[in-house]
Every structure is written in structure tokens, then in C-alpha cells.
Amino acid sequence: DAKTTQPPSMDCAEGRAANLPCNHSTISGNEYVYWYRQIHSQGPQYIIHGLKNNETNEMASLIITEDRKSSTLILPHATLRDTAVYYCIVRRSGGGGADGLTFGKGTHLIIQP
Amino acid sequence: DTAVSQTPKYLVTQMGNDKSIKCEQNLGHDTMYWYKQDSKKFLKIMFSYNNKELIINETVPNRFSPKSPDKAHLNLHINSLELGDSAVYFCASSQEFDYEQYFGPGTRLTVT
């Protein structure tokens, strides 16, 4: 799986949009971008994933650049409960790949009141 | 209704003991996993398992073994516990190997 690079920490004011960047310059054509987060003392939580088109669900939006070398996770209206470590993971999908998720250090997002 | 549950939530035991952590999922998934999160907060895959194959991370000592009595359960057995086994262990499940994974709340194991 391709390696990802994320800033170690970010702050965001409550109610504002939180934009979390991720670089994955070595991503291959069959690899997806996944985002998970881990709130303190809880298990990781799936947020969203995408291949090349932008994706949106009830939790967040995922913007992937045209060359697919980077992406941004957007939490549109951050709340204090969004304070967590956010992980960007690149991996294959659609068959094979029973090696689990490879978590990096992630970005510690702190939402300020 | 909890999707992926683990018991116990906390486990304190002495070196050399044998212990088990239970995991159950009610999502109807066919694939389950065990992860270890160490004191530096790094999450690492230990095992991936479905009814077809068990994939073991080569760095996991053979003192650790997963046991699956049925599709909804994947228990983790640990023999001869060592101090370095102290960590938080997370169970997860997914529908097939490559779909999004759902994690349990974790079991904090402390070996004294």
C-alpha cells in the first residue's frame, strides 16, 4: 500500500469547516483513499473513502486531486466531538489484500470552543 | 445495539499467565481482525480471518492465536504473557477483506 503523509496536528474553531490534508504521491491506479478517525479511548471509526471522484456522506466530504497524489477530508461544521486523530490510509479494494489496515501517525485534530 | 463488542474492557494479569479476549460482531460480516495499539498509539494489524483463510502478521509471536468458533466471533488467546504485551487490543470486522472495517471499543491489557 502507498505511503501517506499528514500533518501531526491541527486546530479548528467549533462550527467552522475542518480541512485535513493528506499526501499520497505514490498511490497506484487501483488504490483507494480511506479515512478513519479515533476519538480518545475508542476504537477507530470509518469515515469515508474514494478512488478518484469527490465523495460526500453524512459525516464528511473527500476531495481527491486530479492527479490523485493528495486529498483533503472536510468536516463541514466541526463540533467538539470531532476532536480525534484522523488517519488517511491508501489501500487496494475489490478483492485480495487481507493484510488489514496500515495506520500511520495521523493528524490530531483539536476543535476549539 | 453494539455492532462489534469485546470482553473484557480491562484485563490486568501477571506475567506468564494465559488469557483470552472475546470479540463478537452482529453485522453479518464474514471477515474479522485483531489489531494492537501500543503505548505510542501505533495501531498494527495482528490477524485477518475469514472462513477461507487466516492471515498472520509475521511480527506477531506465536504465543498469540485467534480462534473462531463461528462467523460472528473471533477470540484472541495469549499464552505466557509478557510485559511487552501490555497494550490496547481492538477487534474489527468487515464484509470481505477489502471493505470498510468496524472496530470494537478495545480491551486494555496490562501485564504486571
Image (cartoon, rainbow, N blue to C red):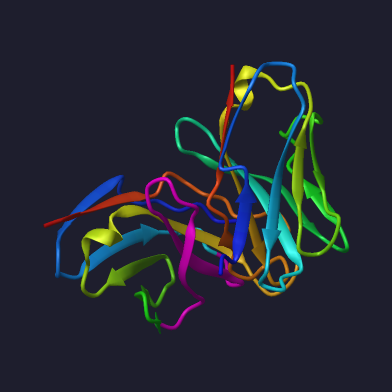
Q: Nearer the viewer, residue B66 or B52?
A: B66
| Residue A99 coordinates in the image, percent (x, y) | 70, 53
Q: Quadrant of residue A94?
A: bottom right
Q: Within the magenta stretch, is there residue A1? A: no
Q: Does residue B35 lie above or below A19 as drawn?
A: above
> Is A83 placed left or right of A12 in the picture?
right
Q: Nearer the viewer, residue A2 or B36?
A: B36
| Residue A23 coordinates in the image, percent (x, y) | 39, 58
Q: Quadrant of residue B25?
A: bottom right
| Magenta highlight range | A28-54
Q: How many marks?
A: 0
What residue do we see at 74% from left, 21% from top? B17
| Residue B72 coordinates in the image, percent (x, y) | 76, 64
Q: Does residue A63 lie above or below A100 as drawn?
A: below
| Residue A95 coordinates in the image, percent (x, y) | 74, 71
> Is B98 placed left or right of B18 in the picture?
left
What residue do we see at 60% from left, 56% from top? A1
Q: Quadrant of the C terminus of chain A?
A: bottom left
Q: Quadrant of residue B51?
A: bottom right
Q: Within the magenta stretch, is there residue A44? A: yes
What residue do we see at 65% from left, 55% from top? A100
What residue do we see at 42% from left, 65% from top? A69
Q: Which of A8 and A75 is in front in this view?
A: A75
